[in-house]
Image: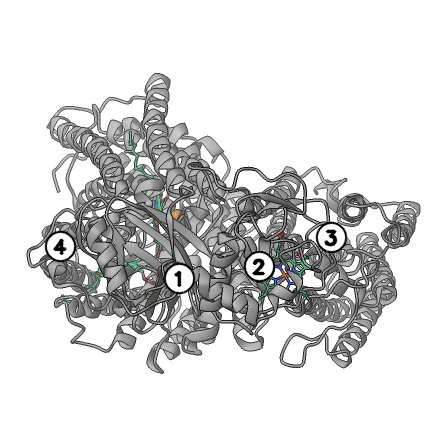
Amino acid sequence: MSENQHHVVPLWLYATIGITLLVMTGVTYFVATLDLGPFNTIVALAIASFKATLVVLIFMHVKYTSEKMTKAAIIAAIFFLGLLLTLSLADFGTRAWL
Amino acid sequence: MGNTPFWPESASNWAQGVDALYIFLVLVSVVMCVLIFGAVAFLSVKFRRKPGVQPTAIEGSHFLEITWSVLPMFFFFAFFLGGALIFFHERTPPQDASEIYVVAKQWMWKMEHPEGPREINTLHVPLGKDVKLIMTSMDVIHSFYVPAFRIKQDVLPGRYTIMWFRATQPGTYHLFCAEYCGTQHSGMIGSIIVQPEAEYQTWLNGGSSSVPLAQTGEKAFAELGCASCHRSDTQGRGPLLAGIYGRPVALEDGRSVMVDENYLRESILDPGAKVVAGFRPVMPTFQGIISEEQLAALVAYVKSLTPSSGQAAGAAPAKAEKGPPQMKSGRSR
Amino acid sequence: MATAVLPPQQRTNYLNAEHGVKSWLLTVDHKRIAILYMLSITFFFFIGGIYALLIRLELLTPAGDLVQADTYNRLFTGHGIVMVFFFLIPVVPAILGNFLVPLMIGAKDLAFPRINLLSWYLYVIAGALMLHVIITGGVDTGWTFYTPYSTAFASPKVIEAGLAAFINGFSSIFTGLNFIVTIHRMRAPGMTWSRLPLFIWAHYATSLVMVLGTPVIAITLVLLVLERVFHLGIFDPKLGGDPLLFQHLFWFYSHPAVYIMILPSMGIISELIACFSRKRIFGFNFVALSSVAIAVLGFLVWAHHMFVAGMSVYAALIFSFLTFFIGVPSAIKVFNWTATMYKGSVTYETPMLYAFGFLGLFTIGGLTGLFLATLGVDIHVTDTYFVVAHFHYVMVGGVVMAYLGGLHFWWPKITGRMYPESMGKLAALIGFVGFNLTFFPQFILGYVGMPRRYYQYPPEFQVLNVLSTAGATILGIGYLFPLVYLLWSLRYGEVAGDNPWNAAGLEWKTSSPPPTFNFDVDPVVDFEAYNYDELKEIPVER
Amino acid sequence: MSDSHAAVHSPDHHPELRHHFMTMEQQQNTASLGMWLFLVTEVMFFGGMFCAYLVYRLKYFNDFAAASQSIAVGWGAFNTAVLLVSSWTMAMAVRCAQLGKQKLLIVFLLFTMLFGSAFLGVKAKEYHDKFVEHHVPGADFSFTEKLLGHPDYVVNQYHAQMFFSIYFAMTGMHALHMVIGLGLMAYLVVATARGKFSTAYYTPVENIGLYWHFVDVVWIYLFPLLYLISRK
Ligand code: HEA
Ligand code: HEA
Ligand code: CUA
Ligand SMILES: [Cu+2]
């Protein structure tokens, strides 16, 4: 049987992750009320990405899987989504340059 | 135009360059086709099945793979460069080009000359003069296409797109709408009439007593109450407009933008979008209040204002240094 | 070639294992689903083809005399939507891919047989919806659905048509997903990646594009429909939206989609050229990886459809530059196919004739793609018949040719019968001539300046249009032929035998037609792909 | 359409092993890969909307900020918490399935459904508020709130409406995924109760779990992007 089927994540870890996620939600809420200029967005996205990473790694067991394809799929998704966003912005972001 | 053409007429400064590049592409392609088809024909005949002859297993060759991956790249770069140079040039109109406003709608073209005359589905242009088209649409996307000039630009609702050319051959040429725009898309055609300068002047003067576009704009500027805020001294609630065109302007949020036709358009229709540094966003929107034609006139008027040209710009420039009123060449946007 | 095998009727195979309509409509056998697809896709091809003929008839004369302007607009829209979404995108993967992927890798079925059936049902539902649109008047947006025309002006049928394309998209997504998982998980023992046939590599690459690209068109169409119904404004400049956003999202899928169409065909061509040259494909690894390269690079170039759309100048430069890189893996393929024949033992059966046709026409289509990628030239020829000619060269000259080649090649495997060889050759020839006569004049027409989507045109363009219409008629006959003789062969064709071509793939190692679970004995692979040097020469000329 | 062919296989096969697989492990790996690929397609699906969001947010930042300020961030944060907890209960459910605790599995699934429904309830309330405030795009739309810190900034109606168009499209699509998730979960509850799963076979629980977590991840991004553009 593959590892991800067998690996049972200990309860304490699930609990820690759950609490961390809730705390981070509070943090992101709080940070949004501060004026950090452009960093507001960056911090908000950083926190979101941190939370998402926890969910993906622990809740979705990606940390424990030996299956390379799972990670490949995630990387592909991020990569191609990135392409969509950045290359679109190559247009919208540079229209006013000329 | 009765006969079947196999090559489009060439009547603008772009035609030669585009044709040359096209011919280059055709030549490379023909050579490639001859090579590939020749090889296919040769190999398939030479190595056709013959009794008693067994095929020989061949693995492949790194040398060949690299060669035929890298060699085409040189051609690709050449194509890219050639195309990019023409394109970049096409998108950077000279400053002193005469500016014609084009408004497209289902299914006709309206043209407004700076001197005032308006035309529908026909455009008179002087021979040998740079002409810049400032185009917008009232409904869907259209595309302004003159095959003899080798130029095409989509015309979008809600903003200006820009294109320029210099006619090099007198004559009458097709104007096509090249972006599908509904029922009469193929009927949205017209002609471009290229006339030598003198003839063109006669045509200009021959028309009904038309008011220059900027002058129409000036009138609108007064009637719409723009002048009450944008006064010719520094006392108005709005910034001085004289000489802003073609220069960067500092915005409230710290950015700075180049003042071009689209910026002027946006400033009038959506003043809040980009607020000039040092001013409060009190200018009302004129979206839905003025027509495309009025807008074009206003834009033309604002552009015509130079720090010395009386009117709204009577007094000395309010803000900082202003460069020379116009650069003779180079980019405008 | 009729080795002493029983006629297909007398052995149990996937066709006669079960009987009755229900056994077909509820089947989870990938081979039967492939047949279901074949029937429905062929149907749509002829619908699209009839549209094409009407278009060509209208363009026979400069005046718009055969049909009304609106009707014409519906014709090319219907033609484009049907041909792209309901014919060309599924044609090779859903028919030949469905049939062959499990066979070629030695699996009993695709990974998710029920999802495979679901894909077909989605296709049928989408197709029915599209037919409904066609019958009740049709859409007139062009297959590109550009806003704000589609959201604020065109006939409201665009909602239904958009939904049809949306549903069809899921059919495509599931097919791609199924292939990827199957290729990863269901290979027979010994079937390593380096032993995978190029057809499989090509389908793998295609599936990547299906999975990564199709969802974007799905959401785009949802937004389009929402915009049309609720006036969201996302694509409407009147409400502050940017119509170019629609174009970006549309082409983010629809450019890669052209590789969904061409990649499987390239897979077919690799199989054909290997078999009929009796050689391993020259530069196997490069051909295999170039498929993946095309799939990935295909996502970097979409805005080359928007050079004159009012995009940023810099973006146009970037996209033009990136587009050329697609030429490299494509070139690798063309050159390697050609080189494969070197020191081979080439024969000219019908599939090989189609492969030759593909080589020539795809090369011309691809090279003219480079014209379009060249900014200065594209400004002049975009939205003219030059583009129309370009894409018919790659889509009809490329994909349809390859599909027909593949269909003839695997016909004995699918049905157990041979098609009549001389008829096949004749049809291939007619098709080739008709095709060039139809579409070559359009290159000239385009450069001279005739815009596309015109139902009336200045009279000086007539001669070239007449040529094109004449060609289309010949081409149509070239397509009718196979329809007739392939059907004929089902009953009267020579019994094929398991491996009439003496070909190397795993699919030829089972009986024709294969049994329900593909192999009577679970296969173990101990040979390289295209090990033609280990196979005996076919003793007699067919 | 289930398998009449299962009998072809060796007698020791698991009842859930389908005809074209050799082993349960192969079947499980296959399903898992399929699910992950499906999630990839979901990323791209939402990606189209994120692209639209990004473009207009950059273009109309101030109007977006103003519109964002008008949504009840408290409810949004609450909902985020609810959804995270549901993700947690889902993770616990999968854990129970791994350990073969069928009863507890049902309990956690029911909890997950409960939190999921709570999320949707709050979402409905938020939608209703927006409706009452005329913040739903359409003829009735009007946006009169000011941008915090910029009292004389005139918010452009169209641009504010654009924000809400995207807001409703994204949260609506997200909610639709939740509804589907709830349906799947209901199926799991029934299947578990019927004893379909065991430590040897619980693939559906695992895969639906992956789906649910994915929906959660989408929300993790939606929350700051839609609710927290600028709250200073
Ligand atoms: C199967 C479908 C298919 C395929 C494979 C392609 C392949 C390519 N296409 Fe095409 N294309 C379409 C279908 C396809 N296209 C469609 C449907 C449209 C129009 C949509 C619409 O508007 O309705 C279109 C439109 C289109 C445009 C936009 C035109 C416009 O509207 O202005 C462009 C621009 O760059 C383009 C480029 C290319 C390129 C560079 C390739 C490349 O992949 C080609 C690569 C292949 C080769 C280059 C040939 C082999 C290489 C060699 C032999 C090497 C030797 C060469 C040299 C040394 C020079 N295509
Ligand atoms: C897979 C894609 C595909 C295929 C296979 C075809 C096949 C053909 N196409 Fe199409 N075409 C497109 C995709 C395709 N096309 C797309 C995407 C567009 C753009 C749409 C848009 O602008 O939105 C387009 C547009 C398009 C135009 C431009 C319309 C315009 O811009 O105004 C034309 C004009 O000639 C044309 C012609 C043809 C012809 C003659 C065929 C032939 O190959 C068809 C041959 C088939 C048959 C002829 C049918 C089979 C035979 C019979 C039914 C029997 C009866 C026939 C006889 C006895 C003669 N197509
Ligand atoms: Cu206007 Cu086409
Ligand atoms: Cu493309």
| Tag 2 residue | B266
Q: Local crowd at mark 3 within 10 Å, few (<14), some, or many (≥20)?
A: some
Q: Chain of mark 4?
A: C
Residues indicated by labels 4 and 2 sit on the same polypeptide chain: no
Q: Chain of mark 1?
A: B
- Looking at the image, is mark 2 or mark 3 nearer the viewer? 2
- Looking at the image, is mark 1 or mark 3 nearer the viewer? 1
Q: Local crowd at mark 2 within 10 Å, few (<14), some, or many (≥20)?
A: many
Residue found farthest to the left: B3
Query: Tag 3's secondary structure?
Result: loop
Residues indicated by labels 2 and 1 sit on the same polypeptide chain: yes
| Tag 1 residue | B212
Q: Residue at x 30, y 55 (%)?
A: B145
For the residues labelled 4 and 3, the Cα–Cα distance comes to: 60 Å
Query: Tag 2's secondary structure?
Result: helix
Residues indicated by labels 4 and 3 sit on the same polypeptide chain: no
Disc on the earlier residue, 2 or 1: 1
| Tag 4 residue | C434
For the residues labelled 1 and 3, the Cα–Cα distance comes to: 85 Å
For the residues labelled 2 and 3, the Cα–Cα distance comes to: 65 Å
Q: Can residue C27 be seen from the camera position used here?
A: no
Q: Nearer the viewer, residue B179 or D17?
A: B179
